[in-house]
């Protein structure tokens, strides 16, 4: 069983591309456990970790929206650091904060990063390896979960993938990159398929 998490809208956005994607894909993938997370620094991590403890999944795929990016970007590294430029959805704006005190500086994703990029590119979907998940809630979640999985000696695939805005989200922002819903759904299906092959 695979767990796929996604976020609620945050900042000035009325929608989150990952929530839209997961809502659509749930219609055809009832075998996947989808988890909606609040865009809140530590609450999101605690919630997903509790689900992982309960469900004992074969793989964990975390999704987030990266407005401004033009490609699907699997994240290679989770940093033990928060330095927010905006508030999370609880009104907190943390600066220069370690996620886990005395924890490792970083964790590497255990997703098949390069295979994801190569597979999506072959399907005509822009995809790039990313070496920074930022220093906001996406990275915070990524680090918290990878830290927990490391402590639990979880050896199956786990990691984070950022998706661009969807076309519908940038109707009035013509200079902002976006990806079609159709291609985004194909991308997510491909990533899930690659994980299924591994587990």
Image: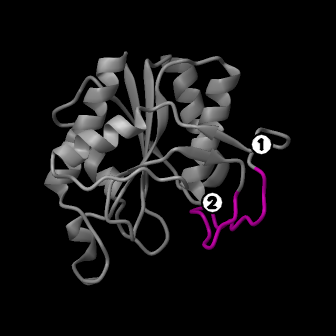
Taking 137 as reference, is 32 above or below it?
above
Residue occupied by mark 1: 100
Q: How is the image coloured?
A: one colour
Residue 122 rendering spot, x and y as whole percentages = 18, 44
42 vs 39, left or right, is: right
Taking 43 as reference, is 91 above or below it?
below
40 vs 18, left or right, is: right
Residue sticking out furthest to the right: 102
Residue occupied by mark 2: 135
Callout 1 touching callout 2 (CB < 8 Å)? no
Give the spatial CA distance, label 1 vs label 2: 14 Å
Residue 189 rendering spot, x and y as whole percentages = 23, 37
Q: Give me the residue at 58% from left, 51% from top.
A: 139
Q: Give me the residue at 27% from left, 49% from top.
A: 21
Q: Give me the residue at 44% from left, 32% from top.
A: 111
Q: Mark 2, residues whose alpha carbon is within 10 Å: few (<14), some, or many (≥20)?
A: many
Image: magenta residue range: 82-98
Residue 115 rendering spot, x and y as whole percentages = 33, 35
177 vs 125, left or right, is: right
The one of 23 and 72 positioned closer to us in this rendering:
72
Taking 188 as reference, is 178 above or below it?
below
Can residue 105 be seen here? Answer: yes
Q: Does the magenta stretch include residue 168?
A: no
SS under mark 1: loop
The one of 89 and 153 positioned closer to us in this rendering:
153
Q: Mark 1, residues whose alpha carbon is within 10 Å: few (<14), some, or many (≥20)?
A: some
Q: Give me the residue at 23% from left, 62% from top.
A: 179
Say how many tags the image has: 2
């Amino acid at each position: 069983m695979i767990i796929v998490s996604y976020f609620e809208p945050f900042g000035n956005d009325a929608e989150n591309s990952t929530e839209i994607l997961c809502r659509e894909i749930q219609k055809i993938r009832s075998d996947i456990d989808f988890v909606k997370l609040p865009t809140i620094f530590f609450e999101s991590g605690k919630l997903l970790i509790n689900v992982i403890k309960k469900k004992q999944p074969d793989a964990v795929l975390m999704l987030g929206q990266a407005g401004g990016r033009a490609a699907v970007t699997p994240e290679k590294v989770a940093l033990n650091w928060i330095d927010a430029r905006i508030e999370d959805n609880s009104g907190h704006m943390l600066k220069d904060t370690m996620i886990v005190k005395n924890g490792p500086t970083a964790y590497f994703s255990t997703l098949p990063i390069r295979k994801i990029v190569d597979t999506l590119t072959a399907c005509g979907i822009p995809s790039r390896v990313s070496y920074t998940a930022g220093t906001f809630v996406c990275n915070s979640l990524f680090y918290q979960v990878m830290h927990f999985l490391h402590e639990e000696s979880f050896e199956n695939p786990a990691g984070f993938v950022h998706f661009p805005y969807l076309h519908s989200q940038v109707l009035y922002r013509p200079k902002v990159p976006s990806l079609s819903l159709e291609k985004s759904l194909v991308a997510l299906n491909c990533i899930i398929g690659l994980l299924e092959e591994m587990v």
